[in-house]
Amino acid sequence: MLDGRVAVVTGGGRGIGRALAHSMASAGADVVISARTATDLDRVVDEITQSGGRATAAVADATDRSDAVRPVQAALDTYGRVDILVNNVGGTAPGDQHPYGDDLDAIEATLTLNLTSAFWITHAALPHMRTQGYGRVISIGSGASRRAAASWAYTTAKHGLVGFTSQLAAITGTDGITVNCLCPGWTNTSLVDFERLARSRDVTPREARAAAEAESAQGRILEPEELGPLAVLLASPAGGAITGQTIGVDGGYRL
């Protein structure tokens, strides 16, 4: 479905980003994967190339404006184009995120990591997508994109991705560019630490996991690879009529 396309996947060294990079490559795309840790990226590139795909690593800090756009430039330098951008970078910066606290640096860092970084790299990719008449922007949101489900800053940033998606889709709709947001629920990645969550709630890790599973209609934690099929559809010509949408791939999270 993606033969001849070039995909950039940010935060691609682990978890959902790694799974989406594999999905894009398996569908025929050449992939540029970015993250801050070179060893993680090299491992994913090796996995993809050993499976017969083509992938390139671009070490970049998404929280730095000039560094954040490096993966787009790497795609242009290596493959001559950029067709698909997956804004997957996210997480919570260390520090006090409570609205009654005074750690504004931590709040600002979380906003930058989850939202502002998507503006920077998307802004770099859009002119090339418009020139070639084909572009796909897919941002990875969260259950916190539509509900009060996490820290103040994280929920604010993930809600912001919804507005980012709908407004950009309205602007680029006649340029051959689609813009969508995929929202996972509880997903089996290194960011989901049930031991830490258990300590914060004064319960056992087993109880913390059971509570998370109970928030899904399917009663389970999803695997990162389960986002791949829909991401590939949205990235492909077959998904050309889907734009401006925020779509849950979450097993029925908090219905």
Image (cartoon, helix red, strand yellow):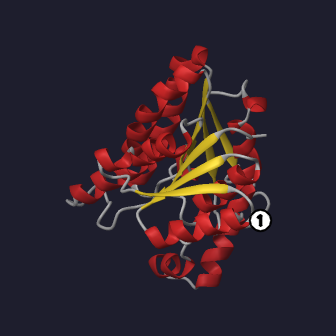
Of residues 87 and 236, the one drawn nearer to the viewer in this rendering: 236
Q: Is residue 215 visible?
A: no
Q: Position of residue 62 (x, y in %)?
A: 38, 52
Q: Residue at x 41, y 32 (%)?
A: 123
Q: Is residue 109 visible?
A: yes
Which of the 4 quarters of the picture holds residue 129? top right
Q: Residue furthest bottom?
A: 204
Quadrant, the N terminus: top right
Q: Name the kind of residue labelled 1 in the image.
A: Gly
Label 1 belongs to which residue?
219
Q: Position of residue 221 (x, y in %)?
A: 70, 67
Q: Is residue 226 left or right of residue 92?
A: right
Q: Is residue 35 left or right of residue 61?
A: right
Q: Secondary structure at mark 1?
A: loop
Of residues 212 and 42, the one drawn nearer to the viewer in this rendering: 42
Q: Position of residue 32 (x, y in %)?
A: 55, 51
Q: Residue at x 70, y 37 (%)?
A: 234
Q: Residue furthest left?
A: 102
Q: Residue at x 69, y 49 (%)?
A: 24
Which of the 4 quarters of the picture holds residue 194? bottom right
Q: Position of residue 197 (x, y in %)?
A: 51, 75
Q: Is residue 169 left or right of residue 236?
A: left
Of residues 149 and 247, the one drawn nearer to the viewer in this rendering: 247
